[in-house]
Amino acid sequence: MINITIICVGKIKEKYLSLGIAEYHKRLQRFAKIDIIEIADEQIPENVNASLSEHILESEGTKILSKISKDAYIVTLEIAGDLLSSEEMADFITKICTYQTSKIVFIIGGSLGLSPLVKKKANKAISFSKMTFPHQLMRLILFEQLYRSFTILANITYHK
């Protein structure tokens, strides 16, 4: 079975997002084991300077890296990552599981993004859009796209 871990900075605060994530989490259980690891987000003052931003990213990055299994394939979600269609995402997951490992870690950063250390550790960076999404909403989008990928692979009509 495929093991997917989603490491996220921050907790989901909005009920509608929690409900959507729970629904896709339930749907995904037939295809993969899904674990969610929430990293506590750092307090960010309104007028944060570059030095403090770096410190916050480094702190969050250290926490993220401590949660990653050594044999996992690491995927970061970044605006500057590769844009994939849903079919390409499904193919990407298949290739990782066929040729590399059954453990995939997806990482969603916090409000400031991801630390350079986390980006450097990643095997691949993907982007869902050139637009910026709130990191909490990104979690729901990732869950939906994972479900869509598995339905494509299983030839289930959801994705059409």
Image: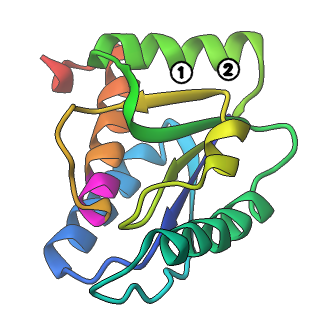
Q: Which residues are magenta?
A: 136-140
| Residue under label 1 | 93
- The x and y percentages for residue 156 are 27, 20
Residue at the (61%, 41%) spot, across then down: 119
What amino acid is found at the position of numbered circle 2 in the picture?
Cys
Q: How many marks?
A: 2
Q: Is residue 154 visible?
A: no
Secondary element type, mark 2: helix
Secondary element type, mark 1: helix
- The x and y percentages for residue 63 are 70, 70
Q: Eyeballing the image, is 115 above or below 52? A: above
Asked if the residues shown at circle 2 and circle 1 are in contact, with their CB atoms under 8 angstroms apart, the answer is yes
Location of the N terminus by quadrant is top right
Which class describes the residues within 10 Å of circle 2: few (<14), some (14-19), or many (20+)?
some
Residue 77 figure quarter: top left
Q: Is residue 152 left or right of residue 118?
A: left
Q: Is residue 32 left or right of residue 78?
A: right
| Residue under label 2 | 97
Dominant secondary-structure state across the stretch colored magenta = helix
